[in-house]
C-alpha cells in the first residue's frame, strides 16, 4: 500500500469527518425567532444537499419530521394540526412549506393590522390637577384636612413650570 493508498485513505477519512459534521449540524439545527419559514427551509435544504453529496440518503419524511420538530413555538398549533390531519410519510417538503408560509403570512398580516388599529392620542388638560384635591382623590374626599390639601395644591401649582398643564397618553383599540 504505497503513496496512492495512503492518500486515498486520508481523503476517505476527511469525507467521513465532513459528513459527520453536516449530520451534527442537521441534528442540532433549530429555527430562530427572527427567521422566516422560507429562510429556514433554505438552510435545512442546503444541509440535506451537503449530506447527500457525501453519499448519504435522507428520505423526505425524515426531513419533514425534522422541520416540524425544530420550528419555533409560534408554529406549535400549526404543527399539531398538520400532524393530526396528514400522514407524515405522505407530505412533501413543498406542501409543508406552502402550509407554513401561508400561516406565517396570516400571522404577519394580523400583527400589521393590530399595529394600525392602535391609535395613540395625546390629551392635554388646560389646568393640570385642578379639582383633584389631595393625593388625586377627587373633590371632597379628604374633608378633615381641607386647608392642608388646598395648601399642597397651591404649592404644587406654583412649583410646576408648565403652569398646571399635564400630558396623558391614551391607547384606543379599534375593531
Image: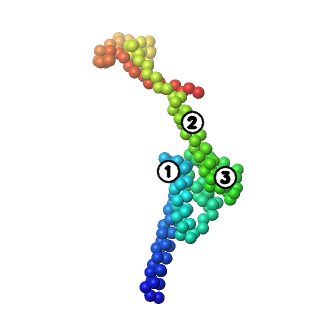
Q: CA distance from mark 3 to mark 1?
A: 21 Å
Q: Quadrant of residue 102?
A: top right
Image quarter where the C terminus lies is top right
Q: CA distance from mark 2 to mark 3?
A: 24 Å
Mark count: 3
Q: Identify the disc placed on residue 23.
A: none
| Residue 122 point in image, percent of width and height | 43, 22
What residue is rendered at 56% in x and 46% in y? 74
Q: Is tag 2's residue or tag 1's residue first in the polypeptide sequence?
A: 1
Residue placed at 62% from the left, 55% from the top? 93
CA gap, disc 2 and disc 1: 20 Å
Badge 2 or badge 3: first in the primary sequence: 3
Regarding mark 1 in the picture, which secondary structure is present there?
Answer: loop
Of 74 and 52, nearer the camera is 52
Q: Are marks 3 and 1 in contact (CB under 8 Å)?
A: no
Q: In the picture provided, is 90 more to the left or to the right than 172?
A: right
Residue 86 percent location from the top left of the image:
70, 52
- Regarding residue 148, the answer to whether it shows in the image is no
Q: Secondary structure under badge 2?
A: helix
Q: Which residue is mark 1?
A: 32
Q: Which one is in front, 137 or 95? A: 95
- Residue carrying label 2: 110
Q: Name the residue rendered at 53%, 69% in the picture.
A: 54
Residue 8 location (% of width, % of height):
47, 80
64 relative to 155 in the view: left or right? right
Tell me which numbered mark, 3 or 1, is placed earlier along the sequence: 1
Q: Is residue 16 visible to the viewer in this orientation of the structure?
A: yes
Q: Position of residue 103 (x, y in %)?
A: 60, 44
> Which residue, given by chain and number where applicable, does mark 3 sit on?
83
Query: Which mark is nearer the camera, 2 or 3?
Result: 2
Amino acid at each position: 500500500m504505497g503513496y496512492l493508498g495512503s492518500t486515498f485513505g486520508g481523503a476517505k477519512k476527511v469525507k467521513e469527518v465532513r459528513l459527520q459534521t453536516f449530520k451534527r449540524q442537521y441534528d442540532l439545527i433549530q429555527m430562530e425567532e427572527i427567521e422566516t419559514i422560507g429562510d429556514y427551509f433554505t438552510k435545512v435544504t442546503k444541509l440535506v444537499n451537503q449530506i447527500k453529496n457525501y453519499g448519504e440518503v435522507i428520505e423526505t419524511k425524515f426531513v419533514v419530521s425534522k422541520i416540524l420538530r425544530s420550528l419555533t413555538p409560534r408554529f406549535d398549533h400549526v404543527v399539531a394540526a398538520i400532524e393530526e390531519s396528514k400522514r407524515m410519510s405522505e407530505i412533501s417538503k413543498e406542501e409543508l412549506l406552502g402550509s407554513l408560509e401561508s400561516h406565517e403570512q396570516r400571522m404577519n398580516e394580523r400583527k400589521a393590522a393590530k399595529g394600525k388599529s392602535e391609535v395613540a392620542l395625546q390629551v392635554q388638560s388646560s389646568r393640570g390637577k385642578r379639582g383633584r384635591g389631595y393625593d388625586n382623590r377627587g373633590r371632597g374626599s379628604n374633608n378633615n384636612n381641607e386647608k392642608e390639601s388646598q395648601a399642597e395644591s397651591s404649592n404644587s401649582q406654583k412649583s410646576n413650570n408648565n403652569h398646571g398643564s399635564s400630558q396623558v397618553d391614551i391607547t384606543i383599540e379599534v375593531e
